[in-house]
Every structure is written in structure tokens, then in C-alpha cells.
Amino acid sequence: MAVKVLVVDDSGFFRRRVSEILSADPSIQVVGTATNGKEAIDQAMALKPDVITMDYEMPMMDGITAVRHIMQRCPTPVLMFSSLTHEGARVTLDALDAGAVDFLPKNFEDISRNPEKVKQLLCEKVHSISRSNRRFSAYSAPAPAAAPAPTPAPAASSYGSQSNSVPARPAPAPAPARASAASASSSAPKRKAYKLVAIGTSTGGPVALQRVLTQLPANFPAPIVLIQHMPAAFTKAFAERLDKLCRISVKEAEDGDILRPGLALLAPGGKQMMIDGRGAVKILPGDERLNYKPCVDITFGSAAKSYGDKVLAVVLTGMGADGREGARLLKQGGSSVWAQDEASCVIYGMPMAIVKADLADAVYGLDDIGKHIVEACI
């Protein structure tokens, strides 16, 4: 059965081009178009598409507002189009918080210069997120968040801060919850003196990382590295967003950064991140032979070489199998590997690859992963 798609954009040119690209795939059917957010809501309710492609800037109602309404009235996987700017990144992250599943850069030049590459990428994204549709039947949009109460500063600690006291950070706003995560399929973890926590993810990762990292205390005793498949223009804005929401510190990694407790370093988009035995970060140019920039396998592999059995690696929601071979190296060195469970994943690809390869020491629902990381490390 063909995947039914609703195309939403105020640009007639872009609506036509996206519709033409999708319609060229015999397994995709464009069932309708809309020119603004209000029309998108009406068309989504009337046509019941499997996937909606959504622009942000539109008259009458913007894309983020439309996504929120759609998630409340007729939950449907949404693929956002975004500009490759810092503001575009911020808007896209807001859309993902509102319930969108994934995003693609909106680049008119690419459509005209490299139509085959654009066609392949767009159709792959549509097919992929259409398979997450079953998770949206139980989607529960969050109630408007009240202003968070100030959180007391944690006790002074040598961990996670350069000063003797740690400023209180605001409690994070609740993230959208699609379906309740199934009970963890593994028991609570045993404590171990981990020297590094490494987390890899892709589709659905920005919201998943937010939900995991906001559970960590400011005095978290291990360094953290994050590998999220994301364009170069987005990772700085994403790191800044996480830093504001979390009690730990989060920054986009730079060449020469030193790992330290309570600091999470996010791999920069378009490049590769490696770690050496001295705890220094190396940022390398993205290799065109690799599908992913950044690549989870590369960072996990360097962690295995540098830290032996002292790594806790976690693979979250995402398409494909990136992370599997790096996890294999970590397991060979005696480190621990966890996977997110299927019920709480947006796309059960990367964690499934870990589980099927028999590399997972534990499988947890998304809402349990953060607390279990704390239990394992503190």
C-alpha cells in the first residue's frame, strides 16, 4: 500500500517540486497540499495522511503551531523543512519538541542542481517516518508548561563545575510523549567506575537526548560524549538548547577539548569526533566515504581504544545501524552497551541493530535511561 503524504508549504514552486519528487516514487501517493498551517490541520483531519511534510514560515498559522494542533487532533508523523541557519536550527528543534519526527534542510539550489540525490533522500525519509505511524495512535500532546519553579543548587562538589558551587538551572519543560514506554526489559544496572558515557542517536534523537540528559545531576561524575546525526548548522544551536535545559553542561565539541565530569560534548555536524587516551577530543573533517557525519561508530571505536572496559555506551532511536560496529569494539574491550527499547523509539533501527547483534547488556525504555545512567555511575 502506498504511503499517503500531505505536502504543506506556502510556496507554490516548492509544493509542486516536492509533490513531483514524491509522486515519482510508485510507493508514495501525494493525497493533498496545503498553503498554511490552518489548511494543514483541516487537510490532515480530512485526508488522514500517513506523513505530512511541513514548512515553518507560512501565513495565517506557522508550521510549529500547526504541528501542535495536529498532534492534539489527529497525530501524524511530520517531516519539517528547515533553513540551514542558526535560526532555522532553533525553529526546527522547537518543531521536534512540538511533535515533528524528523527534518530536512530546505535548499532550493539542491532541488535544481542534484534532483536525484534530493529525490532519494526525501523518499527515504518519508518511507522511514511512515513506519513510525503506529506509535502516534497513542500520542499525548503535552499540556502548556507552567513556569518552572527554581531548582535548589546541588551540594558543592568537585564534579561537573569549575567553581565550588553550581548555579541552579531551570527544571526542563516536559517533552512530548508519544506512547508510554514499555517496562524495562532489563533489571537496574550495577554501579561501575565508568570513565566515559557515550550516547549515539539519529531520528528522534534531539527529543530523546533532552529527556535523558535532563535527568542527570550537576555533579554527574563522568564525562559524556553525544553523537547525533545532524547538519553542521544545527549542532551548535542544539548544544546551546541542551545546556539551558540540563543541570550538566553541554557544548558543541571543538578540537582539543578535554573531557571532564559533568560536561557533555556534542559532535559537530559534518565532522567526526574521536577521543584519545589523554581524554582529549579530536575533531576531524567529515570523510565523504562515510554516510554519517558525525558517525557513532567512529566515536565509539575511539572510545573503545582509549578507555577499554570503562565506557558506558547507549544507543537511542534512529534509522540504520550506525553504532553497531563501534559497540562491538566496546564489548570486545569489556565495556557496557545499552539500547533503547522498541516501544519508546521513534525509529527502531539503530537500537534494533544492537539488540539483533546480541551486543546489548540492557534494554530500557527512554524515560528510564537517564535514571539508570545515574544509578550506574554515581
Image (tube, grey):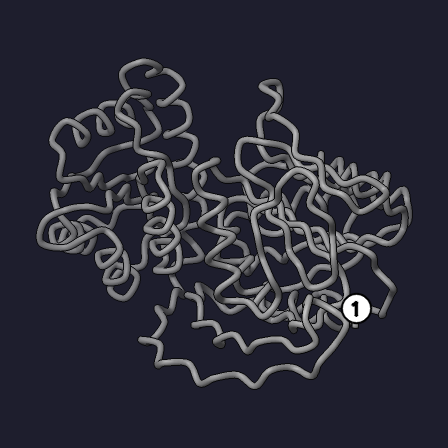
Figure check: 155 above or below 262: below
Q: Quadrant of residue 136?
A: bottom left
> Which residue carries the number 1 mark?
376
Q: As rendered, which of 120 and 82 lies closer to the eye?
A: 82
Q: Position of residue 191 (x, y in %)?
A: 85, 70
Instruction: State the quadrant of the C terminus.
Output: bottom right
Q: Position of residue 324 (x, y in %)?
A: 72, 39
Determine the residue positioned at 59% across, 26% down: 286
Figure check: 145 above or below 66: below
Q: Position of residue 233 (x, y in %)?
A: 43, 38
Q: As rendered, which of 22 and 59 lies closer to the eye?
A: 59
Determine the residue positioned at 22% across, 29% down: 19
Determine the residue positioned at 31% across, 31% down: 28
Amino acid type, residue under disc 1 in the picture: Ala
Q: As drawn, is 226 to the left or to the right of 220? A: left
Determine the residue positioned at 41% across, 45% down: 102
Q: Quadrant of residue 289?
A: top right
Figure check: 39 above or below 171: above
Q: Residue furthest front?
A: 163
Counting other residues with Cα less than 10 Å from the Cα at mark 1, is it few (<14), some (14-19), or many (20 or more)? some
Instruction: State the quadrant of the N terminus.
Output: top left
- Name the secondary structure under disc 1: helix
Q: Residue furthest left?
A: 60
Figure check: 176 above or below 152: above
Q: How many marks?
A: 1
Q: As drawn, is 89 to the left or to the right of 320? A: left
Q: Position of residue 214 (x, y in %)?
A: 56, 68
Q: As drawn, is 75 to the left or to the right of 264? A: left
Q: As rendered, which of 342 and 330 lies closer to the eye?
A: 330
